[in-house]
Amino acid sequence: MDITELTVHELQEKLKSKEITITQITKSYIDRINEKETDVQAFVTTLTDEAMEQAKEIQNKLEEGEIKGEFAGIPIGIKDNMCTKGVKTTCSSKMLENFVAPYSATVIEKLDKENIINLGKLNMDEFAMGGSTEYSYFKKTKNPWNLNKVPGGSSGGSAAAVAANLVPWALGSDTGGSIRQPASFCGVVGLKPTYGLVSRYGLVAFASSLDQIGPITKDVRDCAMLLNLIVGHDEKDTTSVERPKVDYTKSLKNDIKGLKIGVPKEFFTEGINEEVKDALEKSIEKYKELGAEIEEFSLDIAKYSLATYYIIGCAEASSNLGRFDGIRYTYRTPEFKSLKELYKKSRSEGFGDEVKRRIILGTYVLSSGYYDAYYKKAQQVRTLVMNEFNKGFEKYDIILTPTSPTVAFDIGSKTNNPLEMYLADICTVSVNIAGLPGISIPCGVDKEGMPIGMQLIGNKFCEETILNAAYTFEQAIKFRENYKPEFKK
Ligand code: GLN
């Protein structure tokens, strides 16, 4: 048995029946990282020694009966934009290359309480801006299905690490698709929760009205379990909401009879790859077989989502990233003659091109002369997008789309064309604009064997509905049993 092939719920069963121990689990992952990380390059920081120490400690405490807990000793990987006390949090940027967080994000504290073991910090596009993880200052993560392809982004390290069995599950963050799109490129499950469900405290902010933390896992059950662990009201995040506690695993019923699914036709036209379209059409047929009622409808406003997203996202980013000034906790230029020059040189040298592009764009759309034409207009369109979705959810329980118009693309093929890179987000951004939950699950592969993702969008706080629909589909097609990453070179 290869321990690293197992899902977290399978690990839990084997721990319960005493077939394996916690130290064995951690050891297996460390061996796997040593074997595959040179190919995949998913980590910015590995914590393997620390993890082994922790595993031994937890094992002892469990044996002594000092601690209990079904997640004690389960490893995880964390996207490198979530603060982890005493460990570097770089956002894959030169700006934060040496930043050691003095506190942990709320989600990390929640995992710590369960005695979950952090195997390391995972690579990403710098400050989560990008769709391929190629904008990391440190390294380019490879797609485990084909090492010449990108893993998607910005949570590419998280998705690749889960797909390559370097971690059993991971946390990512999603501002415009950064959990779902890499999950789709790497053939794993990724969920962006409803805005406000998971605390953003300690997540380095990109665009605060869009950012959410969420799980990237091997299957839907693990996704529901990790969601259980991270949700909850947090007074340190004023946008976090108070909700009655639910156990998301209870929603996995493997039955969707009568579920009403709306399919927006605009997501199946321009720019969508034929093989992706075919796979989605087959998936729709599968849902019909499973008892769902499917109807096509129009979500016309979606065509404005991308422009709206990039205006709002850049505006918020330009404001959020103002704090990186070369004075506090960041990179500082070695030579400067005045305060102004210190700011200027530190920011010029510390930020990469994509981040600078967004700061400039964001500053422009917020400037007094252009505010009405761009930022204000984008906020108005945002309301229209929300209204359209609301109308959709009057008729449907779920809205089904591709996660991305294509499968994973070749490394280097879009880095010179930012606009083309932005187009990779066309299917995911409207979900963030409307603050809705969305999950991506694998639904097939193309001729080259690259995974294709399907996105299920739910109404606000209807995570249970999309999780059950995803689970039922997963049980029917058994993707993980049929396809595995091959590390093609
Ligand atoms: N790819 C999108 C962007 O570049 C989404 C990023 C994200 O969700 N963090 O903005």
Image (cartoon, helix red, strand yellow):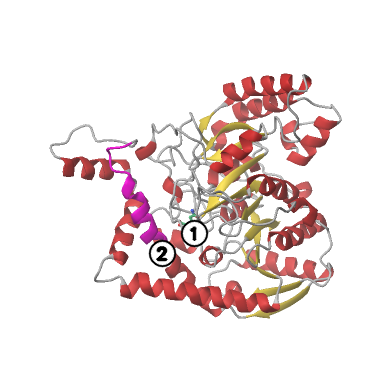
Question: What kind of residue is marked 2?
Answer: Ile
Q: Is mark 1 within 8 Å of ligand 1?
A: yes
Q: Quadrant of residue 36?
A: top right
Mark 1 touching mark 2, by CB under 8 A?
Answer: yes
Residue 12, percent from left and from top: 78, 36
Decide whether residue 396 is among the magenta residues. no
- The residue positioned farthest toward the right in the image shown: 17
Measured Cα–Cα span from mark 1 to mark 2 = 9 Å
Magenta residues span: 310-328
Residue 265, percent from left and from top: 62, 77
Residue 446, percent from left and from top: 66, 58
Q: Quarter holding the N terminus?
A: top right
The numbered mark, 1 or 2, whose residue comes first in the sequence reads 1
Q: Quadrant of residue 263?
A: bottom right
Q: Identify the residue at horizontal 73%, vertical 27% (top origin).
A: 67
Residue 291, percent from left and from top: 84, 70
Q: Identify the mark at residue 312; answer none if there is no mark.
A: 2
Q: Identify the residue at horizontal 67%, vertical 35% (top origin).
A: 114
In the picture of the structure, the residue carrying the numbered disc 1 is 210
